[in-house]
Image (spheres, rainbow, N blue to C red):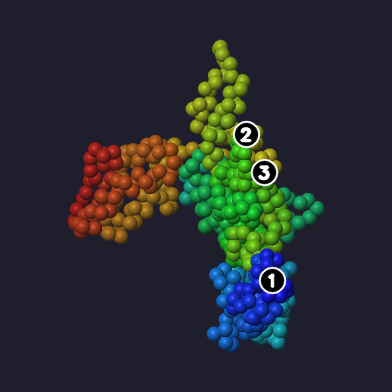
Amino acid sequence: MSENNTRDDGYEKVCAACHRTESQAGRMLRMYGGLYVCTDCLQRTFDMMNMGGKPADTGNIPNFGPGFDPYMMNPFMNMDMMSGMPNMPKVKKRNTDGKPASQDPNGGQITGEPGSENGAGVNAQANGTNGQEEEELPALDYKKLPPPHKIKEQLDEYVIGQERAKKIISVAVYNHYKRVTKDAAGDIQIDKSNILMLGPTGCGKTYIVQTLARLLNVPLAITDATTLTEAGYIGDDVESVLSKLLKAADNDVDRAECGIVFIDEIDKIAKKRNVTNRDVSGESVQQGLLKILEGAKIEVPVGASSKNALVPMVSMDTRNILFICGGAFPDLEDIIKRRLSKQSGIGFNADLKDKFDKEPNILEHTTNEDLREYGMIPEFLGRLPVICPLHGLDQDMLVQIMRDPRNAILKQYQKLLALDEVDLEFDEDALASIAEKALGKETGARGLRSIIEEFMLDIMYEIPKDSTIGRVYITKGYVEGSGGPRIEVRG
């Protein structure tokens, strides 16, 4: 075995496609990831690429193993070449006039009028569509977005209570799209105002953003902070939040650069206390998000959650992306009470130490000092200037949540039984009893469905057996287990 045929570790080089050694196949080329490919397999790969992914000899297709793409073997490929290849994500870019720019296989733009020599015919050949143009998403028209009071009115149809939170979200979204328009460009540069939403579990933080995504035709990505780790460790990189936004915008970079990102469970990346090893999922993630929140050009993997040699990259500018972070922040109330009761004393007209123990909206007194004590670093809080506290739900609000929204849970069960031609009615006392049970679970509105599912199980099971049942009344006794429902027969 000659010295040139060996790797640095002393073993002979082996082709990753045909599994022949260098002494058998000839000269080897080193590829990404420390792999070696012989010149024969490399030539067959280039022939396959030149024929649009259909090799002349199907029996000699190189087998690169799972997860290895032969298109990534060319180290001189750019994103424009990758976008035109089969099985590769198409990344859309736009010209300065806002119209989508077609890309030829060599990375250049194809221009011309439809029907001309450089127009639709050449474009169809380059994209492999045989003259059929791909359907493009319409460009964002920011002037057609409703004003804040209209956005709040639409949110009121789905979300009960949280009036201040809905106002903050409506104004933030409206101002965000005003500042990214060309009319806002000038001597005065308007900075964006990222939002930090905090409130107990089940109060509607995620639901408000999900509802907003349905109402507005803007790219919006909802991601979870619990999966994020520092770069180089197991888990998703911080750039994965932008990858999801790019996917939500159908890989249109310009649309994604004006979108909205909601990072849920942000309190789970708080700085850990009394740890001896490296905090790769806490403070390190906050530091990794600083650059993205403030605004910078970030290299984002397309179609993957982490950067590696086999994933194409695209550059995204985050200056016009609105970030909304939400978290429950458990035990934050104790930190606020401890700060507010520092001036407590004894005697007449003195502030008692337990003055704020029964304060229902204690989160309205949240300051950056409380959040820093909780574990959020000052640099991270400085990039979230708007603090939006949400209130806990009381019994009356839970009753309204069950009954009033457009897709209320009671309306869902009524529609299910209506398919069996059965009417479902709830007594007011029964609704109050359900809300009281949900308050005891301390899971907010999420506890309503589990309670209703429990006592509706027998009804949903027995009704299809008897075709004479026409109406079912849910009573307080049935909810509490001391009675049964009232049933009326047809006719």
Q: Give the amino acid at mark 2.
A: Glu
486 up-or-down from 72: above or below: above
Q: Which residue is mark 3?
A: 380
Q: Which residue is mark 1?
A: 6
Q: Which residue is mark 2?
A: 373
Spot occupied by residue 448 in the image (x, y as percentages of width and height): 39, 44
Along the line of sight, the residue nearer the viewer: 269 or 3: 3
As drawn, which residue projects farthest toward the front? Answer: 1
- Which quarter of the rendered picture does the C terminus lie within? bottom left
Residue ID at (54%, 32%): 333
As drawn, which residue projects farthest toward the right? Answer: 187
Q: Residues within 10 Å of mark 3 (few under 14, many from 20)?
A: some
Residue ID at (40%, 38%): 441
Spot occupied by residue 462 in the image (x, y as percentages of width and height): 23, 53
Along the line of sight, the residue nearer the viewer: 37 or 173: 37
Q: CA distance from mark 1 to mark 2?
A: 57 Å
Q: CA distance from mark 3 to mark 2?
A: 13 Å
